[in-house]
Image (spheres, rainbow, N blue to C red):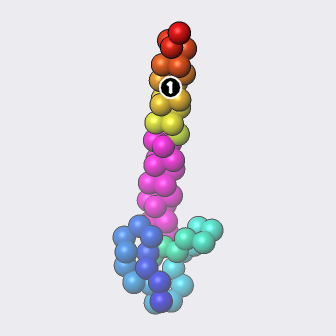
Amino acid sequence: MALCRHCNSLILFGGSRDGVLRFYNDQCRSNGVRVRVASHLLVDFVKRRNEGRARRLLSAVP
């Protein structure tokens, strides 16, 4: 038995897979993949923004 990574429903038999992640059905899988991609994009954006801010602060130090 496993839990769906998107809706947390109990999966008794089968389900849909995306790599090591298991989903209740194809709709949950497509929604879960979209959420995962969006979160990766947000994390990358924040990292790039913070790195740029750190470089500007370091360049301003005499």
Q: Is residue 6 left or right of residue 13?
A: left
Q: Is residue 10 above or below residue 30?
A: below
Q: Going 41% across and 67% down the picture, which residue do you hit?
A: 6
Determine the image quadrant of residue 55.
top right
Q: Position of residue 31 (x, y in %)?
A: 44, 59
**Residue nearest the viewer, comparing 46 with 38:** 46
> Residue flagged by tag 1: what amino acid is it?
Ala
Q: Position of residue 22 (x, y in %)?
A: 52, 74
**Residue nearest the viewer, comparing 33 with 53:** 53
Q: Magenta region's main secondary structure?
A: helix
Q: Going 55% across and 14% down the picture, which residue do you hit?
A: 59
Residue furthest front as drawn: 62
Does the rendering let one see residue 53?
A: yes
Q: Is residue 33 above or below residue 11?
A: above
Magenta stretch in the rendered image? 26-43
Q: Mark 1 falls on what kind of element?
A: helix
Q: Going 59% across and 67% down the picture, which residue do you hit?
A: 18
Q: Is residue 17 left or right of residue 3?
A: right
User: How would you rate the neighbour count of disc 1 (Cα within 10 Å): few for under 14, some for 14-19, many for 20 or more?
Assistant: few
Does the rendering let one see residue 45?
A: no
Q: Going 48% across and 29% down the picture, which residue do you hit?
A: 49
Q: Is residue 17 magenta?
A: no
Q: Position of residue 44 (x, y in %)?
A: 53, 39
Q: Is residue 5 left or right of residue 62?
A: left
Q: Position of residue 58 (x, y in %)?
A: 53, 19
Residue identifier under label 1: 54
**Residue nearest the viewer, comparing 25 with 3:** 3
